[in-house]
Amino acid sequence: MARSPVSDEELIARYGPHLNEAPPGGWDAGVTPDRVVKTHCCFCGQQCGIKLKARDNAVVGFEPWYEFPFNEGKLCPKGVKRYLQGSHPDRLLHPLERDPAAPGGFQPVSWNQALDRVVSEVRRIQAVHGNDAVAMLSGVSLTNEKSYLIGKFARLALQTANLDYNGRYCMVSAGTGNKKALGIDRASNAWSDIPLADVVWVAGSNVAETFPITTSYIWRARDRGARLIVQDPRVVPLARTADLFLGVRPGTDSALFGAVLHQLIRHDWLDHAFIDAHTVDFDHAAAAVAEMTSQWASDITGVPATRIEQAAEWWGTASTGMLLHARGIEQQTKGVDNVLSAINLGLATGKFGKPGCGVTTITGQGNGQGGREHGHKCDQLPGNRDITNPEHRAYIASVWGCNEAEIPGKGIPAQEIIEAIHSGQIKGLISICFNPAVSAPDANFTAEALDRLEFYAAIDFFLSESGHHADIVLPGSLHEEDEGTSTSGEGRIIKINPAVAPPGDARRDWEILLDLAARLGRGQYFPYTTTRDMFEELRIASAGGTADYSGATWERIEDEMGLFWPIPGEGHPGTPRLFEGGHFYHPDGKARFHGVAFRESAEVVDDEYPVWLTTGRVVSQYLSGTQTRRIAGLVEQYPEPLCEMHPRLAEQLGVAEGDRVTVTSRRGEMTLPAHVVTTIRPDTVFIPYHWPGAQSANQLTNRAVDPASKMPEFKVAAVRLAPAGGRSPTTDARDLDLTEGRT
Amino acid sequence: MTYTSDDTPIFVIDQSRCIGCEACVQACMECGTHRGRSLIHLEHVDRASTTQTAPMVCMHCEDPTCAQVCPADAIKQTEGGIVQSALKPRCIGCSNCVIACPFGVPKYMAELDQMMKCDMCTDRTSEGLKPMCASVCPSEALWYGTIDEYNDSRRGSLLRDFFFGRQEVRTKVYTVVDDLSAGPIDVMGGRQRSWLDDPFGLDEAQP
């Protein structure tokens, strides 16, 4: 029984989101911190260093950490205000059990009651429907230690194959493409290579809003005279400063990359020595782009042919270059194709393994890079090992002290788990750090699926919209309440230090999982007393794998301000730049070109749904907003979703800035204010996705997935628009405070 | 990193680098001298047509207009040339300074009936630390360091002499321009790029 126990209004009144305006005691409390803790931001994959100021058991402020080399004190608005998630009125302090008669729909219960209920429901469902009828969904805001633990917990304690993670909705297409082409799933370079590039090409990444700190690296390259190419359906803030802008239609990136490869071949802007010595299958890639003229690509992408040719010339003739891509090209049913066709450009011109050279994803989530390496991805075991490979299974079984046969096989990926819940094959769910009610595509379908669960236990620190469906809610820990490591988008392993302890009856996530494992009768596999114990086991488990952490120690990570994996064995210096000397990670040491034919997105515009929809983020909110929708300063910066559209489209609709419009797709509809700007393609609208319910952009998005990575197509859908009547004020309420005074 | 008085660090604004993220707006609130109140300005120039935004800290004029027009003599400079918020006992809330400042910096805080403005984080800079906004700014549009550090790492010339009609204003804070000798300067302009006039090639003749 996993329906919301009471109305959304009652749930929100009790559990929020409420807004935390100020640190404990208020802005003028004059609280003097009694300690300052060096740690990292809890949000995106940049993992900026930050110093948290704490007093007693509360985080009371922050101080820039100037010495941490990645960001040198820099922070985005989320990083500045992240400390306000502590001491928050919405913080879950007690285990809760669904009870429609209780105020707010949940009744506080003891840990014993809550854990016993979880274990009895898991056992009941598994006895009737099989072990795999209970699934686990996990998230990559968790540390490496917890990611490793969850991989082991699902396989050995829950004994289910069906564990997957929210990176499936983030950077999995990049990981899949990287493995296919390069034999390894990691950023190609430390970010210190970006300023060394003569051309920086940013494809499908709103760097200024989603990875603000990367902006300074790109600017350092530009200060040296580098050219900047930006490829995006919107003139995003970074694009404004670009030397060349490629305003692609959503879903056509591989056509553009293919046409660029066509130009590189036509003009012989190729590094033949590199291609011959370090790659295979160039002929396949060349054959696939033989007909991809710039005019052909222009017709598909909407980018003028001259600009495509200009991009090819700059990339092909520069001696160094970095191509940075993110969700824009990855969250498509062709995400892997897009990534492979981008990598082709790097291989063709020898731009790998040298200073200022690389083709890399910008990992989105805090520990997206590390989390996926250590085992909460449905097809992987620790160290980026393959769960279907008998040797890999045997090695991990030897580390875990179990029979190889006790490790379940490959599970199904996150979107298929949601579908299997909807179809009734999966009956039970445990989630941690994952809010599919907001983040999964086709939100109405997701809500139906969650409603159909026989049992749902959610581990979380705030009651997320997914948690509304839970039977049992277990209050876990915030980022600043636990110790461990994380691996940033650069592949840099960093140390997360606790500033406070979990408040009330809340517990550290791993303590909850250990208790559940013991109650499931599998405690023998989880003999940990600290997270350091887990890290030490992770080092052994990852040894010899692609993502080898065996040489990393907590001490070295702190002393050296992070270590780049692979770091095989004690004393190894780590590997900031991959592929040096043209060494790739396939068994023959060579990279693979891929022939990429162009195909359309799963859904294309037609007479009924004539406008492209693309979705994404804004700078002041993070992912499903579970944390950032609870911090006043961030909410004031961008309070509600807006529908960005070009004046030509607005004129056709007869709407002006602030007028409310209804946007409808084959899956749902939503009504929101229009934001009329010339910085978006006239055939495309953009809606950010951070909000739930009627404000959820994912009501409109498509569940279709990439065949290889199983990434849903968040970035391309077909919609129609109509004026809804009425206007929303678009004045910044903060300006009014100056003249009217804040109450 | 801390600076000593011998380093004479400077504050630099490069509007062309601003990405509008508002990290400065959020961080300004964390400054110890005015916690909870953001005194920096960040404006969209014309969001309908561009993402260009413009951050504005106090330029700390050598002879500040705000102080000249204050009927209550409430606006004082430190020895280091930092123009401070109106002194609370003197400020009469008339907002002359808000209207007169050529850079639009002072804010009248209705709740306090007092003018407050950027004081370049006196609590931090006096201890050799960077101001909050220039510490966090992800694009280094707001920047604090020595002239040598600037010349080693950045492009663009530094400008601090302005004319507003016939009024000449010299400021402590610098702004960045491409070419000092190029005549009237458009601080928003940066380098001209043809694609900006037609980002999506809507009017571009297809060959």
Image (spheres, coloured by chain):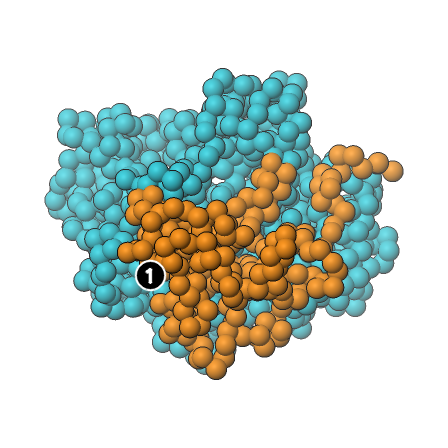
Chain colours: A cyan, B orange
Report whether B18 appears left or right of A125: right
Q: In which quarter of the image is residue B166?
A: bottom right
Residue placed under numbered mark 1 in the picture: B33
Residue located at (66% from left, 61% from top): B177
Give how far across and how far down residue A700 sits, in percent: 50, 28
Residue nearest the viewer, comparing A721 with B153 = B153
Residue furthest to the front in view is B71
In this rendering, does residue A221 appear at all? Answer: no
Residue nearest the viewer, comparing A118 with A502 = A502
- Quadrant where the C terminus of chain B sits is top right
Residue nearest the viewer, comparing A185 with A207 = A207
Secondary element type, mark 1: loop
- Classify mark 1: residues with Cα within 10 Å, few (<14), some (14-19) or many (20+): some
In this rendering, does residue B172 appear at all? Answer: yes
Residue located at (79% from left, 51% from top): A310
Q: Identify whether A35 is placed above or below A251.
A: below
